[in-house]
Image (cartoon, helix red, strand yellow):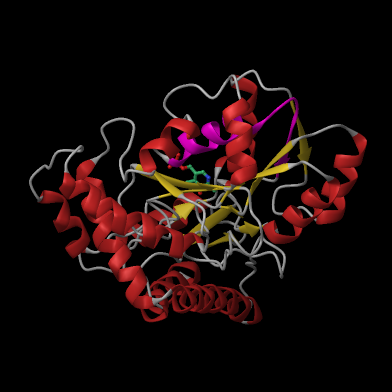
Amino acid sequence: MTDFGKFFLPGPTEVKPEILATMTRPMISHRGAEIETMMARIDERLQNVFRTSHPVFTVTSSATGLMEGGVRNTVKSKLLCLVNGAFSKRFHKAAVNSGIACDKLEVEVGHAHTPEMLADALRRDHYDAVTVVHSETSTGVLNPIRELTAAAHAHGDVVMIIDTVSSMAAAPIECGAWDLDYVLTGSQKALALPPGLAFCTANDRVMERAKASRMRGLYFDLVEIHSSWTRHQSPNTPAVSLLYALDAQLEVLMREGMEARWSRHAAMAQRTWAWVDQQRSAGLDIRVLAPEGYRSPAVTCISAPAGRTGPQIVSAMKARGFVITPGYGDLKDTMIRIGHMGEHTVAELDVLLDALGEVLAS
Ligand SMILES: *Cc1c(COP(=O)(O)O)cnc(C)c1O
């Protein structure tokens, strides 16, 4: 990798060299006072990132682990999965493979779920939990989690299990004020850390469910994790090196401030959408897949112009030193995706968009 500012994958994202460098520090015991001091600082700062007074747990796993943990700890009898892309489909698979009774409420790829749709579905059957992906990284669609959660809670004892893997620290998320029940994310997206850590917060409603769950397993048992968390520890050996990076990166986040970070992401996203519109006005037939009002500030999925495929565009960009990615799954040939998240700036994004403009015009 060359200079910072050329790697625009929607995960993993580019990690600042000084953050990577912290990972070469020597090991410490995961049961000593030193790690407890570090974790106390990390735990408090993560609550600022998640905007909650409830605990935020740090787990050594990719984010999918906490998707699976989410459904296993919370569902009482039947789960509803809001599906609008590859990652929301994965939630459903985690439930099916865990033997949890569940239904899908599917909308077309590239679309979002509305609170009316959810309220309707909750009236049709007895669901006690709902999974939703906030920022569908496969399409760039942002689901209205605040309104969906309000609709679920208006219905009764329904727990929301929310994936914010590509939106946490990019889009405004108020876990406390919006009464979000279980919210999970991963280290390698907008938090701009290497892959390997996952985080979740759980409110009292979730912890009550977890205590009663007979299928919460061992590794993602929220009751165990919570009990260790009260001592700033983890039930088993954490990825100590990644915790060093987390500690250093949270310092960066606190210095920037969450509001400023959200604004920077909004500015990068708006710049990308405006660029697509400009290109279209200039005669290039490309568009943003997600409808206005439901667009992720972290990732944009753009249609490839006629005669070009996603992988072709991606390799032409690679030849210029930039990393982006084709559409996900079925969208691979017809789309490209730009991850404008983490530590990137509008100025760095402009350089990428200039190069993309040249590639598309050639
Ligand atoms: C990347 C991603 C995941 C999967 O994360 P892993 O860390 O690979 O397990 C899940 N959901 C969304 C929305 C993602 O973007």
Q: Judge whether residue 59 can be spotted in this image.
A: no
Q: Nearer the viewer, residue 201 or 311?
A: 201
Q: Nearer the viewer, residue 12 or 65?
A: 65
Indicate yes or no whether the magenta region holds residue 73.
yes
Q: Nearer the viewer, residue 204 or 268?
A: 204
**In the depicted structure, whether residue 205 falls above or below residue 267:** above
Q: Judge whether residue 120 can be spotted in this image.
A: yes
Q: Residue at x 80, y 34 (%)?
A: 127
User: Residue 111 at what x, y percent from top left?
Assistant: 73, 54
- Number of residue marks: 0
Asked whether, in this view, residue 322 is left or right of residue 85, the answer is left
Q: Residue at x 32, y 37 (%)?
A: 234
Q: Residue at x 50, y 73 (%)?
A: 262
Rendered-image quadrant of the C terminus:
bottom left
Question: Which region shows up in magenta?
Answer: 63-83
Rendered-image quadrant of the N terminus:
bottom left
User: Residue 290 at what x, y percent from top left?
Assistant: 67, 61
Indicate yes or no whether the magenta region holds residue 48.
no
Asked whether, in this view, residue 4 is left or right of residue 302, the answer is left
Q: Residue at x 25, y 47 (%)?
A: 242
User: Residue 39 at what x, y percent from top left?
Assistant: 28, 51
Question: In the image as oriented, which residue stretches furthest toward the left?
Answer: 26
Q: Quadrant of residue 18?
A: bottom left
**In the depicted structure, whether residue 172 falls above or below residue 34:** below
